[in-house]
Amino acid sequence: MKIRGSTLRFTIPMILLFYTGVMVIIQLGIPNTQDLTEEVIGPPNDPGLDGILGQKWILHIQNEAPNLKPLQDHGKLQVESPVQKKSAFKKLANSVYVYSAYLENRQPDKPKVKMIVLRKSKEEAEIHCHFRIRGKLFRNVTASFREMSENHGRQFGGWIYECNIPISVLAEHKKHKTQLFYMPLSCNSGPLVKVKVGPMTQSKPSRKQDLGLCVPPLFGELSISATIQFIELWKILGASHFTFYLHDVSSSISRLLNFYHSRGEVTLLNWRLPDHIQNTEIWYHGQLLAIQDCLYRNMSQFRYLSFVDLDEFFIPTINFTLLDMIQELESSGIYSDSLNTGLSFKSTFFAPNQILDTEQYLTYLQLLVRTDSFSSKRTKLIVQPLKVEEMGVHHVSRHVEKSTSVVNVATDIAKIHHYRTCAKNFDSDARCVPEVRDDTILKYADKLVANYKNIIKKSLPLFMPKD
């Protein structure tokens, strides 16, 4: 058979393109639902979603730069990431680790050092703060402690430890014009471990940012396309900065998040747990500890914080942004920054395996059918961090002032779009049928698609093979 040159020139590139596409789909995987249930610790079994998100990213790369081959991803977290491979938890004693410490000064006359601690729940752990002035030991203080509210009876869990800062220590710092940047800790008479003391919980930055987003530990096979859509849609909704905790991600996701990090839009934190702690020994990769760390890390920098997973979006029904919605709720007297801690939203499920609206360019714009009912258990919040003492996954565990409360937002004002299969566990009242069409998200389509294409173009060099 005689093959014409033009046919050959057309066929070979198409074969190579198809092969590249298949390989990248395999490597990119699907967006992990990051849900609370143990049954979804691995990537969800939604073949339709897998194909959609994997192929979407490949097709978008091909459309923006048809002559480029995306770099195949075979490794885990590469060295170009600011996140290290070793655990960021500092060992104080056997089965006792500290992740971070912050200067708690919301009560100026009673300043404290507050520590986020991972430890065995049934073993005693007495921690001491060793305050030093100009390198010399000045005072030792025994920390008070309490268990976080949602450890779910696992062998390891999150604890909050606090050391009151003696007035004499404050006076010495003032006298020598020094600040508390590092502090040695010890546990159960063990050796001293130097820990960095993070930013003050209350300070006066030149201008607070409006809305920050905290994303609990990332793990599993995450989709580049879905991750870009997540960040860009939340930016449209009003988020100005994202804090990601990286537990176990591919180098492709690492490169993408580092791209956003270089733009000043993302903070990346290592969330590798101590090697001997198994997934079954701690609730959802230590999610609750990451939530507390993000709360205190960002407390002085943001007016509002929200804690969400990669498959969740708070979508206002009428307003375009969440900040506009909050302003309108304040104007109408439904919500008050002075009287309330934050806002709570109910969720509804958009199943990934539904029939897609193929007229839309991006995956989340194609999924337009949801459950008619709403989950009152799988709520998420926007809070004023300065008013929160301890944050839960679905609620405020401790308010700074008991007189403040959370406002439940009506579903006709806003709701959580949760892109996962409907689940009844932990919510016996949940109903997965009937379903209804909801195209509220399409009001963001033009802007989201434009922003998505812009990111694809600017991040392309990250996925090109190195010479």
Image (cartoon, helix red, strand yellow):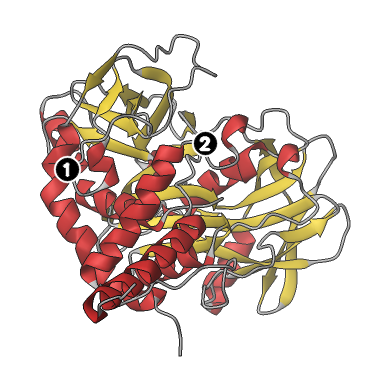
Name the residue beneath numbered marker 1: 321
Q: Which mark is residue 427?
A: none
Query: What is the secondary structure assignment of the residue under circle 1?
Result: loop
* Side (left or right) of 409 relative to 397: left
Which residue is at the front of the view, 266 or 184?
266
Q: What is the C-alpha distance between the residues marked 2 and 1?
A: 32 Å
Residue 336's image quarter? top left
Mark 2 vs mark 1, foreground winner is: 2
Residue 263 seen in this snapshot: no
Q: Nearer the viewer, residue 405 or 418?
A: 418
Q: Please report the residue visible at 63 percent of the width from the left and 52 percent of the height from the top.
A: 115
Q: Position of residue 239 (x, y in %)?
A: 28, 51
What secondary structure is marked by label 2?
A: loop
Is residue 107 shown above or below 424?
below
Q: Which amino acid type corresponds to the residue marked 1 in the rendered image? A: Thr
**Amino acid type at image mark 2:** Asn
Query: Where is 201 relative to 6, above or below?
Result: above
Expressed as whole percent of the image width and height from the top left, the position of residue 1 reads 34, 72
Above or below for 382 versus 90? above
Q: Does 243 sit left or right of 335 as displayed?
A: right
Residue farthest front in this picture:
1
Picture disc at residue 45: 2
